């Protein structure tokens, strides 16, 4: 096919055009519905990910604290039971 030949529109060209138009429409609708200040951006997504990571880390620390607390309580109960069982019964 030469450079001066007729241009053919293939299936991929149509798909890319439709996809591009759809993205444009979604972007315009999102901007109209939520406003410019509430548009999702890469920076906003990254900040949300950082906040989610911090929240998960805080939950992990709290769970670790609770597990340590339960372990200490179980050990104390075992020590009390062993001390009680070691004494003669009256």
Image: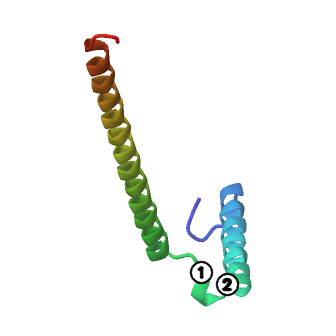
Residue plotted at (35% across, 30% down): 74
Residue plotted at (41% across, 59% down): 53
Q: Give whichever of 48, 69 is nearer the camera.
A: 69
- Relative placement, left or right, of 75 versus 4 is left
Q: Position of residue 83 (x, y in %)?
A: 26, 20
Q: Position of residue 90 (x, y in %)?
A: 35, 12
Colour setting: rainbow
Q: Quadrant of residue 34?
A: bottom right
- Relative placement, left or right, of 56 versus 40 is left
The image shows residue 63, relative to residue 48, as above or below, that is above
The image shows residue 54, relative to residue 40, as above or below, that is above
Residue plotted at (28% across, 18% down): 82
Cβ atoms at labels 1 and 2 below 8 Å apart:
yes
Quadrant housing the N terminus: bottom right
Q: Mark 1 sits on what residue?
A: 39
Q: Is residue 8 visible?
A: no
Q: Quadrant of residue 25?
A: bottom right
Q: Position of residue 2 (x, y in %)?
A: 57, 64
Name the secondary structure under disc 2: helix
The image shows residue 86, relative to residue 14, as above or below, that is above
Q: Mark 2 sits on what residue?
A: 31
Q: Give whichever of 56, 5 is nearer the camera.
A: 56
Q: Give whichever of 70, 62 is nearer the camera.
A: 70
Real-space Cα distance between discs 1 and 2? 6 Å
Q: Is residue 15 visible?
A: yes
The image shows residue 40, relative to residue 35, as above or below, that is above
Say which mark, if any, is on residue 58. none
Q: Residues within 10 Å of mark 1 (few under 14, many from 20)?
A: some
- Mark with earlier residue (1, 2): 2
Q: Residues within 10 Å of mark 2 (few under 14, many from 20)?
A: some
- Relative placement, left or right, of 64 versus 24 is left
Name the secondary structure under disc 1: loop
């Amino acid at each position: 096919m030469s450079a001066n030949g007729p241009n053919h529109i293939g299936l991929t060209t149509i798909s890319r055009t439709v996809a591009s138009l759809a993205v444009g429409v979604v972007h315009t609708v999102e901007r109209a519905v939520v406003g410019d200040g509430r548009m999702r951006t890469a920076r906003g997504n990254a900040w949300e990910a950082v906040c989610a990571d911090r929240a998960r880390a805080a939950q992990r620390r709290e769970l670790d604290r609770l597990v340590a607390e339960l372990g200490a309580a179980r050990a104390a109960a075992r020590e009390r039971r062993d001390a009680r069982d070691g004494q003669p019964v009256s």
